[in-house]
Amino acid sequence: MLIQLLINGLVKGALIALAGLAFALYYNTTRIFHIAFAGLYTLACFFFFSFFHHFQQQWLPAFLLTAIAIMLAGALLEITVYQPLSKRQSSLNVILIASIGMMIVIINLIAMLYGNEVKVVVSGIADSFEIGNVIITFPQLWQFVISILAIIATLVFLKLTRWGKNIRAIRDDQSLAMAMGINIWKTRITLLATSAFLAALPAILVSVDVGLDPYVGMPVLLSAVVALIIGGVGRFEGPVLGGFLLGILQALVVWKFSTRWVEAITFGVLIVFLVCRPQGILGRQKREV
Amino acid sequence: MNYFLHIAVMINIYIILTLGLNLLVGYSNLLSISHAAFYGIGAYLSVLALVVLKLPLTLAIAIAVIGTAILAYVIGKVSIRLKGDYFVLVTLGFQMIVFAILYNWVSVTRGPYGIPGIPAPKLLGLFEISGINGFLILSSILVTMIIIIYYRIIHSPFGRILKGIRDDEIGVLALGRDVATFKTHAFVIGSAIAAVSGFLFATYVRYIDPTSFTLDESIFIVSAVLIGGSGTIKGSVAGAVFVVVLPEALRFLGMPDSIAANMRQVIYGLLLVILMMFRPKGIWGDYEIQ
């Protein structure tokens, strides 16, 4: 039983790690608490749902169109909301509130268009295979593999490409990056688009598995944030570590107590970290003025 | 006629909520998304006082407020020194934990089944307050009392220091004031005020369940404060009136019920974005959140 729960926890952990990385990509760099992430996640689920049905259950065109659509949505959000606010030097809390506003708008527009009930992409019980006593479904396998690949690809991109270097420069010192000639506004657009794309991956993988409704975004955002804080703010590997730890922690809570206390304990751990070690496991302690 | 009286009672309940949160957001620069948690704790404690302890009205309110204040003190003490985002995250964590406990500790709170049949509170143990007129009077009296207390607080030396902290925390620190303690006190007072709303809500609706006290509700109260205007009493009143009246107004515009709730949210969301872009102070506010 424990092994099964841990395997489930690892798969969930991979998804949370990817979502956390997607969130951290934007948050670490711009310090903007991008709550509209929940909205983009939900948008990705519904884009895929629509395209999948439009293309008669072929996943490849549905996926490609969803990817393009969500990246455009991310870019649009950056251009219409975050950049104007940043350019007029609004405080971070003001941008946070605007982000909450956008999340509310996106989620409720989706609910108005599609209805509030749960939708199904693929019906029926998923195929699975067994290793010893442990059952692994194929959706789980896809979720794990694709998440790991996406995480590795993103981390490699951040380390090795010029774009990644620009991101890290902006993260470290925005004004200096600007002075060095990096166009932070253009970079931020591609950044949010990439973050949206990375968020779309777990969105699609999970909605194909368990269905979707307009309110799936918030829990994912919350998990991503907890993963970010536990793993470490400021370093992109942080949320990845945090995500896996969180997945395993949640599996252990289910094993020891029951599913009803998973959320309470998750946020309890969050508060403990915030109070005792706000920089997370991998973060560097910073002196803030 | 009863319809308008009902709206008046709800407005009163929300005015108390927005006033409490405004003390945090508008006067102390503490963006808290846990206000609904304190609202809920106040409601559940009121039920405890009325049903289990069978206390009269004033004592029940006192229990609710003091219990909530103690909890707020614990949370505040621990988190007030955290900067910006981290403080918001602690309040977020607290909100989620409170909801999880209210929802899952079924043996104590009856979880999702909620608590029905909350008795009408008895003033001085004799007069029962029930019915729409009774509650209109009770809620209006409570609102007036709270506004008066609020006014005295913000125009006192304590209030001035809070405003100083909000405008220039380091300056106030440099003057030798214990900023953390002031903020903690503000956090406790603001959150305890929410407990009064919890009491009113529980005794007016006479049924409570955890779904009234979710993160969404916290965000809703924050929206009310920001739309109306942070940093002023009339801003809080305006915000409360706005968020209570808007859905009713939409109903009269003939919006079908199926999308009314979502449409209302879209309007709030858009308003928040537009306000943050062009008037972060809110309609009648005098403080732009930092």
Image (cartoon, rainbow, N blue to C red):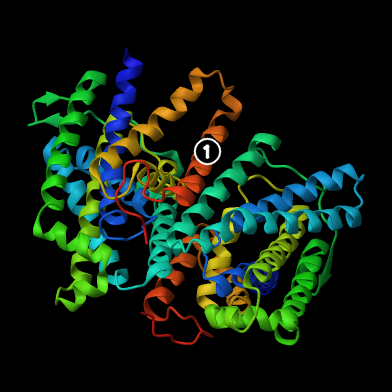
Question: Dividing the image into 4 quarters, which one contains the N terminus of chain B?
Answer: top left
Q: Position of residue B266 (x, y in %)?
A: 55, 38
What is the number of callouts on the image? 1
For mark 1, does the 10 Å Cα neighbourhood hold few (<14), some (14 to 19), or many (20 or more) residues? many
**Amino acid type for the residue under numbered disc 1:** Gln
Q: Position of residue B195 (x, y in %)?
A: 25, 46
Question: Dividing the image into 4 quarters, which one contains the C terminus of chain B?
Answer: bottom left
Q: In this figure, which residue is indicated by the disc labeled 1?
A: B265
Q: Position of residue A227 (x, y in %)?
A: 56, 72
> In this rendering, is residue B34 above or below A164?
above
> In this rendering, is residue A80 above or below B19?
below
Q: Position of residue A122 (x, y in %)?
A: 82, 48
| Quadrant of res A90 | bottom left
Indicate left or right for B219 with B161 as reference: right
Q: Residue at x 14, y 77 (%)?
A: B176
Q: Residue at x 72, y 79 (%)?
A: A163
Tell me, yes or no, if residue B268 can be seen here.
Answer: yes
Chain of the residue that carries numbered disc 1 in the rendered image: B
Badge 1 marks a residue whose secondary structure is helix
> Toward the viewer: A166 or A275?
A166
> Toward the viewer: A176 or B138?
A176
Q: Residue at x 56, y 70 (%)?
A: A27
| Quadrant of res B124 | top left
Indicate left or right for A79 with B71 as reference: right
Indicate left or right for A4 with B168 as reference: right
Tell me, yes or no, if residue A237 can be seen here.
Answer: no
| Quadrant of res A91 | bottom left
Q: Residue furthest top?
A: B1
> Toward the viewer: A182 or B30?
A182
Indicate left or right for A44 with A138 as reference: left
